[in-house]
Image (tube, rainbow, N blue to C red):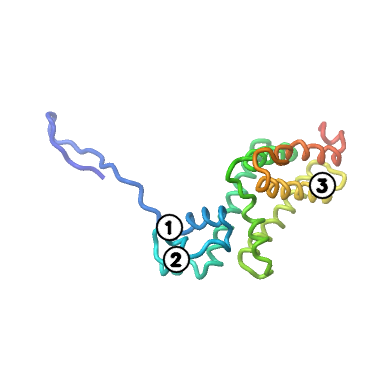
């Protein structure tokens, strides 16, 4: 868009500065819910608090999400997408090197898990909060963890591990321990040792000849 103005050089057209369009109600609801759910826990946050933070009405929330449970599931799908973005960025930094890919992700996790305000893994937290097998939030969390377990197993096979299933499960337990200990201990907790312990697990299961390829 342009506007016309007159100067010493005659009439000229100048671009009009435009503001970024405001977030739609659904996006504001998702963003507000994500912040509150992660910090406080899903069960602890009421709909009133979400709509107040988002600056919308309850009818607006329910037009976009059938229920708070569905909003929780949407939050977890967004959380999962962010997880895989980080995981794939780590993989891209070490092409054709599954060991390096996994350790790179763990370096980032070790840093995040020892920062103030870290609240663990939102997907793990949701599985703890919702024990019912058919709850929408639990279904998202379980599907993600199963996919992660398969991905770790494939990476361990690519490393040439003697027992890739066992190694993958050990690494998954290590990840879950980092999520939990980061929440409990903070800056000086066991998550500081995440990469070193992972290296020991991997090297104990992957023959030297495979590591030197």
Q: Position of residue 181 (x, y in %)?
A: 70, 46
Q: State the quadrant of the C terminus.
A: top right
Of the numbered discs 2 and 1, the one sitting upstream in the chain is 1
- The reply to whether callout 2 and callout 3 are in contact (CB within 8 Å) is no
Asked whether residue 73 appears in the rendered view, the answer is no
Q: Looking at the image, is mark 2 or mark 3 nearer the viewer?
A: 2
Q: Residue 167's mark?
A: 3
Q: Quadrant of residue 189?
A: top right
Q: Residue at x 58, y 52 (%)?
A: 81
Asked whether residue 94 appears in the rendered view, the answer is yes
Residue at disc 3, secondary structure: helix
Q: Position of residue 106 (x, y in %)?
A: 69, 40
Residue at disc 1, secondary structure: helix
Q: Position of residue 113 (x, y in %)?
A: 65, 43
Q: Which residue is mark 1?
A: 54
Q: State the quadrant of the N terminus.
A: top left
Q: Which residue is mark 2?
A: 61
Residue at disc 2, secondary structure: helix
- Cα–Cα gap, marks 2 and 1: 10 Å
Q: Residue at x 83, y 42 (%)?
A: 160
- The reply to whether callout 1 and callout 3 are in contact (CB within 8 Å) is no
Residue closer to the observer: 24 or 39: 39
């Amino acid at each position: 868009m342009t506007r016309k103005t007159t100067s010493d050089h005659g009439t000229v057209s100048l671009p009009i500065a435009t503001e970024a369009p405001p977030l739609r109600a659904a996006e504001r609801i998702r963003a507000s819910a994500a912040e509150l759910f992660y910090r406080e826990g899903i069960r602890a946050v009421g709909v009133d608090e979400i709509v107040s933070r988002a600056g919308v009405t309850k009818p607006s929330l329910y037009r976009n999400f059938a229920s708070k449970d569905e909003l929780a599931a949407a939050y977890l799908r967004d959380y999962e997408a962010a997880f895989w973005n980080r995981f794939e960025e780590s993989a891209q930094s070490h092409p054709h090197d599954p060991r390096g890919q996994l350790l790179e992700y763990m370096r980032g996790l070790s840093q995040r898990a020892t920062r103030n305000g870290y609240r663990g893994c939102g997907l793990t937290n949701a599985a703890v909060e919702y024990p019912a097998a058919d709850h929408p939030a639990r279904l998202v969390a379980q599907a993600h963890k199963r996919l992660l377990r398969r991905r770790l197993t494939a990476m361990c096979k690519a490393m040439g591990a003697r027992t890739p299933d066992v190694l993958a499960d050990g690494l998954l337990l290590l990840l879950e321990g980092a999520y939990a200990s980061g929440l409990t201990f903070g800056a000086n907790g066991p998550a500081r040792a995440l990469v070193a312990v992972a290296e020991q697990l991997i090297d104990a299961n992957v023959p030297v000849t495979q590591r030197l390829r």
